[in-house]
Image: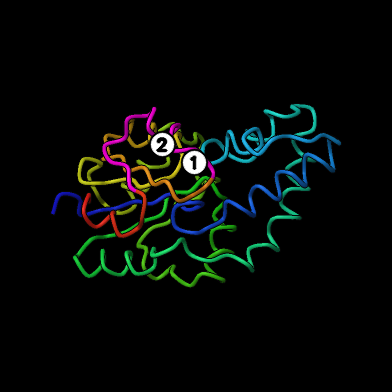
Amino acid sequence: MRFPVVLFDFDGTVVDSGAIILASMRHATREVLGREYSDAELLQAVGGPGLEAQMRVFAPEHVDELVRVYRAHNEPLHDELEACAGMEDVLVRLREEGRRLGIVSAKRRATVDLAFETVPIAHLFEAVVGGDETELHKPNPEPLLLGAERMGADPADCAYVGDSPFDMRAAKAAGMFAVAVTWGRIHDRSRLEAEEPDAIVDSAEELLAVL
């Protein structure tokens, strides 16, 4: 097989969390800043640097409060989470093919674990890297390289699957096969295409053909 190790982004790739991220971004900016932003403005940095950096875009002087209000609103919403359409079946099939799977997320490790309580698929992944486990964040390759290291894998043997431009940049910088998915509804397809990923897919089933 071309890629014996497949690493996945989490939000918008494995779990269908775009709606709750948007709702919590809107809630935090309204509550703290008293301002309205478009969906595109609220989601522009999601999936790359950590939440603190995402909030710094709106108001550097209010980052801590924005993060606190966001998390207080967002974490209870994890009870509503579901896997992205078709993803659970595809993950199982990849494992049956002999692939080894991991998660590399911008989400804090504790929040990834919170999501796994509602979407019980943690057993399918050998390694999980949370956004609070590295000093540098996507689009820097450090989190992806840590994922490969934890799995004892050569980055050249890894594919990275994600829904954001930051994912694609990180995958290329890490020397991994970059697969963009369009179902996350966080970033437009045009933003993904602009990163020139190695492959772009519109359904979970299509992953089986490109990996």
Task: Please check the rendered image and state whether residue 198 is part of the magenta-colored stretch, yes or no.
Answer: yes
Quick one: SS at disc 1? loop
Q: Which residue lies under the disc numbered 2?
A: 142
Which quarter of the figure is the N terminus placed in?
A: bottom left
Q: Position of residue 193 (x, y in %)?
A: 37, 32
Callouts 1 and 2 close, C-beta under 8 Å: yes
What residue sits 39% from the left and 68% below the top? 88
Q: Position of residue 74 (x, y in %)?
A: 69, 55
Q: Which kind of residue does numbered mark 1 sit on?
A: Thr
Viewer-closest of 196 and 78: 196
What residue sits 46% from the left and 39% below the top? 164
Residue stretch in magenta: 186-201
Q: Which kind of residue does numbered mark 2 sit on?
A: Glu
Sequence-wise first label, 1 or 2: 1
Q: Which residue lies under the disc numbered 1?
A: 134
What residue sits 63% from the left and 63% below the top? 78
